[in-house]
């Protein structure tokens, strides 16, 4: 899409309608009584010699483009059903428009003769910038505030139809989950899964108490943590054929140079039935839970699930039965997933960008072994290369990075959706890449084989545990090894013993020790000094960390 130049539109704001500023206790104002709007003007259905201009509008629908074209508001018989999503301050909300005539035929808004426009009910302060292109409207939030807008369909520059007004809100926290109780300081929590008993626990790192325990169907589930600052974890149980989605009840939202912190009671959002649930990957606003059995992937809308208290999902088939690599959810409903070149059930040898479950781009990737979401795209490991896919507007570009010859099969990729760095591990070394430049930052030989998957924490440190029980800390921007712990983590003697996990942030790293029933806290701002040991009992293995992004 080629954007048009920004058109700044004046918007009048009444002080009583302003959204609460940072730190204020006021809530967003009530809509107040609905004001009747004339749904037709003299220009609505003006006749011309072009018979197409005579068509009467039967339905006018607004779609959240970033949510996979979900209809959020529709106009029937002169009344709006639904509402516009809030526009994030200093960010863009993309809205799609679908117009059908009285006979049910969709009007082709991509036709150059047609155009969409946005008109405002008042004319004062500028809180939003509008761009239109075909069926799309981009709303960029300039400052927080509320107004009402009317949408117009134009033909050859002349207004043929204008909707009644609908409320538009610009809010700094639009697209974020704001609920529970706001607190002054971070309230970090861990979720750990037991490798010996079918249970998972949410643990308060301040009070050192269990806040909630969830009964599972099998021990040692696969734990996937939410994005940084998020609050959701997925516990996948391959043998039981279910995946549980847990809200840990502690999260952080960034606001410029500081954060806002919220807490609530931990809860189970729901359970997914899958053939063989395997890896889950978290994108900016969605979680993709893959099934390693039949190739099905369930994509969870994190925000709407939190708001409703129940899972909101969509299903897609990645086309590779038996593949447990996972799928990476991207903005605007796109998903990156393994794909077989022949379209059958063969091993994945391509990576595909999916839209609506259908591949719109594919790229060769022999022996695809791992993938992870990064800002604006994904990193994918193939037998001899890494692929860095970047989604810019609707354009998908793939860059190839040749792996050094001495690197084995990449089994894990550590990445974070907030910084353009990723670390691929073959268990003996790390290949750290810059995903913006698609270049290798450093190839790091580990002092011993890896015992845990590598992890990039909320502070940006790259952490992992080696088979000697030592925790290592790297700076992924340079590849420099910053510290190694003096105290070690107890590991099981058997080759198939549960693996430790490492997570963290706010100057702390947390490492599980299934062998002795403890979780160790190391200070990442003090040479990995052992700060605390939590004797939680059982065999804590998989970990997820919440609530202290800022």
Image (cartoon, rainbow, N blue to C red):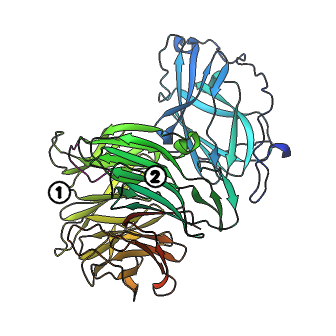
Whether pointer 2 and pointer 1 mark residues with C-beta atoms closer than 8 Å, the reply is: no
Front in this rendered view, residue 99 or 280: 280
Residue located 62% across and 54% down the image? 264
Residue 527 in view (yes/no): yes
- Most common SS among magenta residues: loop
The numbered disc on residue 214 is 2
Mark 1, secondary structure of its residue:
loop
The one of 307 and 38 positioned closer to us in this rendering: 307
In the picture, residue 342 is in which quadrant?
top left
Rendering coords of residue 432 (x, y %): 33, 73
Q: Quadrant of residue 306?
A: top right
Q: Residue 286: where, in percent of width, then height?
A: 45, 48
Q: Is residue 136 magenta?
A: no
Q: Label 1: which residue? A: 367
Instruction: Look at the numbered disc 2 and give the secondary structure of its residue.
Output: strand
* Residue at (55% x, 53% y) in the render: 266
**Magenta segment, which residues?**
320-327
> Where 434 falls versus 263 (above or below)?
below
**Quadrant of the image containing the C terminus:** bottom right
**Disc 1 residue crowd, few under 14, some 14–19, many 20+, Cα 10 Å:** some
**Which residue shows up at 18% across the image and 62% down it?**
383
For residue 99, what is the image quadrant?
Answer: top right
Q: Earlier in the sequence, mark 2 or mark 1?
A: 2
- Give the CA separation, mark 2 to mark 1: 37 Å
Pair 2/1: label in front: 2
Q: Is residue 77 left or right of residue 204?
A: right
Q: Position of residue 285 (x, y in %)?
A: 49, 49
Residue 326 sits inside the magenta stretch: yes
């Amino acid at each position: 899409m080629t954007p048009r130049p920004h058109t700044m539109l004046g918007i009048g704001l009444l002080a009583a309608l302003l959204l609460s500023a940072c730190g204020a206790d006021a809530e967003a104002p009530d809509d107040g009584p609905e004001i009747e709007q004339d749904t037709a003007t003299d220009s609505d259905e003006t006749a011309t010699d072009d018979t197409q201009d005579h068509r009467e509008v039967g339905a006018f629908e607004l779609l959240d483009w970033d949510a996979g074209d979900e209809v959020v508001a529709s106009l029937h018989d002169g009344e709006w059903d639904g509402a516009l999503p809030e526009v994030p301050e200093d960010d863009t909300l993309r809205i799609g428009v679908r117009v059908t005539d009285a006979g049910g035929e969709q009007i082709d808004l991509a036709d150059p003769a047609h155009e969409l426009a946005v008109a405002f009910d008042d004319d004062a302060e500028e809180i939003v910038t509008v761009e239109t292109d075909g069926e799309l409207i981009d709303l960029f939030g300039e400052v927080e505030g509320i107004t009402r807008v009317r949408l117009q369909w134009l033909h050859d520059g002349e207004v043929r139809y204008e909707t009644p007004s609908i409320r538009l809100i610009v809010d700094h926290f639009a697209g974020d989950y704001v609920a529970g109780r706001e607190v002054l300081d971070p309230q970090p929590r861990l979720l750990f899964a037991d490798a010996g008993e079918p249970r998972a626990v949410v643990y308060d790192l301040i009070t050192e108490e269990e806040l909630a325990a969830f009964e599972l169907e099998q021990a040692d589930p696969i734990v996937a943590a939410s994005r940084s600052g998020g609050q959701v974890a997925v516990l996948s149980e391959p043998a039981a054929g279910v995946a549980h989605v847990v809200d840990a009840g502690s999260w952080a939202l960034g606001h410029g140079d500081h954060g806002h912190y919220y807490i609530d009671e931990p809860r189970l959002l729901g359970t997914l039935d899958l053939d063989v649930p395997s890896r889950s990957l978290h994108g900016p606003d969605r979680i993709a839970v893959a099934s390693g059995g039949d190739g099905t992937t369930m994509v969870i809308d994190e925000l709407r699930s939190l708001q409703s208290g129940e899972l909101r999902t969509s299903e897609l088939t990645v086309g590779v039965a038996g593949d447990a690599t996972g799928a990476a959810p991207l903005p605007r409903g796109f998903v990156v997933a393994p794909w077989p070149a022949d379209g059958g059930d063969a091993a994945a040898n391509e990576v595909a960008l999916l839209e609506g479950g259908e591949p719109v781009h594919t790229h060769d990737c022999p022996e695809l072994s791992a993938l992870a979401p990064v800002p604006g795209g994904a990193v994918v490991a193939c037998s001899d290369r890494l692929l860095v896919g970047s989604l810019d507007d609707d354009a998908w570009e793939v860059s190839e990075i040749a792996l050094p010859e001495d690197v084995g099969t990449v089994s894990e990729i550590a990445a974070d959706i907030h910084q353009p760095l990723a670390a691929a591990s073959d268990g003996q070394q790390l290949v750290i890449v810059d995903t913006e430049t698609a270049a290798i930052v450093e190839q790091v030989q580990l002092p011993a084989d890896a015992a845990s998957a590598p992890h990039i924490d909320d502070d940006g440190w790259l952490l992992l545990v080696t088979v000697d029980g030592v925790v290592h800390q790297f700076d992924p921007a340079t590849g420099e090894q910053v510290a190694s712990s003096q105290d070690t983590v107890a590991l099981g003697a058997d080759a198939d013993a549960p693996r430790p996990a490492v997570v963290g942030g706010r100057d702390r790293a947390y490492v599980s020790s299934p062998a002795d029933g403890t979780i160790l806290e190391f200070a990442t701002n003090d040479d990995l000094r052992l700060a605390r040991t939590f004797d939680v009992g059982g065999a804590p293995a998989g970990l997820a960390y919440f609530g202290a992004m800022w």
